[in-house]
Amino acid sequence: MHRRITAPGALAAVTLLLAIPASASSRSPGAPGIGDPYYPAYGNGGYDVSHYDLRLKYQPATDRLDGTATLLARTTQDLVRFNLDFLLDVSEVRVDGAKAAFRTSGEHELEITPDKPLAKGTPMTVVVRYGGVPSKKQAYGFTSWLRTPDGGVAAGEPEAAWWWFPSNDHPLDKATYDVSVQVPDGSQAISNGTLQSASSRAGWTRYSWRSDKPQATYLATLAVGRFDITTGTTKGGIPVLSAYSKDLGNVYGAARSSVERTGEIADWLTGYFGPYPYNALGGYVPNTGTGYALETQTRPYYSPRQFAAGSNTSVVVHELAHQWYGDLVSVARWKDIWINEGFARYAQWLWSEHEGEGTAQQLADHVYASRPADDPFWKVAPGDPGPENQFHLAVYDRGALALQALRNRIGDADFFAVLKGWPAKYAHGNASVADFRRYAEQVSGKPLGGLFDTWLYRPSKPAADAARAASIPVRAAGTKGTPVQPKSWKKIAATNGVHEQGHKRSGGRVAGGGHVE
């Protein structure tokens, strides 16, 4: 028999440990990433945000932005520390009214240590005071803040929030927003949702915007400049507000004649996707030099270069289609980007039919026939393209081709039932490509695993037998009987090159920002 002698100090330590509740001993820091395989450091673990209240002041002349962000959130684990994604300089952080310690780490992490640990399921209010010059801040060698001659714009994908407000920056954590921005008289501040008020005092005007439906962080936008603003309503009664930079030059007419059709196009899309999901609509065209457009919720961003060759309703169709596919139903992980881009591209094909410029089938035939099997285009799998190819042309064109193959396999009645039913099923939430396949199988009653594998996941051109099974003609480009190029093709493809130029980043990664139109 052995006797263990316990020293008094050790006994006291054991007694103290026994006195600590188990929940306290299990408290740990929230993860510095939400778990996305493409972007491991994006988003954060340990909490869920329900609302952002942003009170900002911006000086266009110097690009200086000062703000106070109030986040309403709830812990999803026992927490001793948590992160926000942010780049500007922070002067103070409070959690539930008490000052909290904070420091920066990594490329874009703000680490916050509350005065007291937080138990799982606890509501918390986080206040961050900050300031800085967004255009001077970089992460991973790039900036998503777009400086303009008369101000600045926040619009980028998959990241833009870091440059103007602290957040849990991943589509899995959606929230509502109040964005109040003070700017010098003569400038305007544009954001998402509805304009609640605009009031002037002592040479400054404050614009207050509200988004009352859940919104992903990358879909939040801010634009400050000098704009011509138009208002109206859709046939369905949704208020429309659009803004055009006063210095767009010779693209002003083309931009305005395109974006002013927003209400008409949104009403048309409801026939395919169901009721418009928000209480505001519009678009804005600032004087930026980018080549992309972006589906910023309720109020898409358009680059002037989208309209360099004339009016372009196709790009408006694309961004408005995203209000259902991408905004209302968002990706579960960034690898599910096909849920956004394949469907928005297919909406352009449907618009082509509507305009009498080529059917979706003719566009699909052209995509399949115009690229030989050894074209690198077929190496990209739209169902999981990889972060370096997240906005590759194949995600758009091959992605839309996959939808036409699905349409031909299950028939128009089930296909269009899927298009309309999917946004309703996952409204204001997140879903994956696998979720969509299961839903299409449920509606159609047909097994679709092989079709999805062939058209979305194999890094090769679908073989002739697979094409025939999906009613896609098998004819090589340049041969007799090759499908005629639809009239709409040039409009749809006109800015693909601009897209590629606009999405290059150091290190070979895809740049923040939107689409191929």
Image: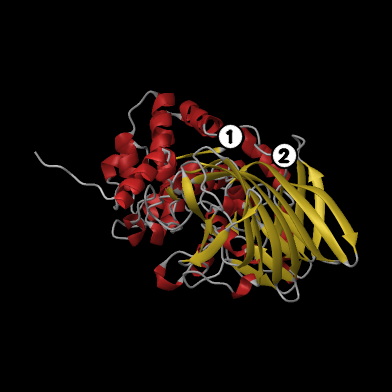
Say left or right for 248 vs 120. right
In three-dimensional space, the C-alpha distance between marks 2 and 1, rounded to whole angstroms, equals 19 Å
Q: Is residue 362 above or below residue 422?
A: below
Where residue 55 sits: x, y (%)? Answer: 73, 56
Which residue, given by chain and number where applicable, does mark 1 sit on? 272
Near-viewer residue (48 or 16): 16
Where residue 151 sits: x, y (%)? Answer: 73, 70
The answer to which quarter of the image holds residue 492 is bottom right
- How busy is the neighbourhood of tag 2: few (under 14 within 10 Å), some, or many (20 plus)? some
Q: Residue at x 51, y 66 (%)?
A: 104
Which of disc 1 and disc 2 is earlier in sequence? Answer: 1
Badge 1 element? helix
Amino acid on which disc 2 is placed? Asn
Amino acid on which disc 1 is placed? Tyr
Near-viewer residue (197 or 367): 197
Say left or right for 459 vs 407. left
Badge 2 element? loop
* Picture mark count: 2
Where residue 128 sits: x, y (%)? Answer: 64, 58
Q: Is residue 182 above or below residue 505?
A: above
Say left or right for 288 vs 415. right
Where residue 264 sits: x, y (%)? Answer: 71, 42
The answer to which quarter of the image holds residue 236 is top right
Instruction: Give the position of the C terminus as an image quadrant.
Output: bottom right
Q: Residue at x 27, y 50 (%)?
A: 7
Near-viewer residue (126 or 452): 126
Which disc is residue 279 wearing?
A: 2
Q: Residue at x 62, y 33 (%)?
A: 271
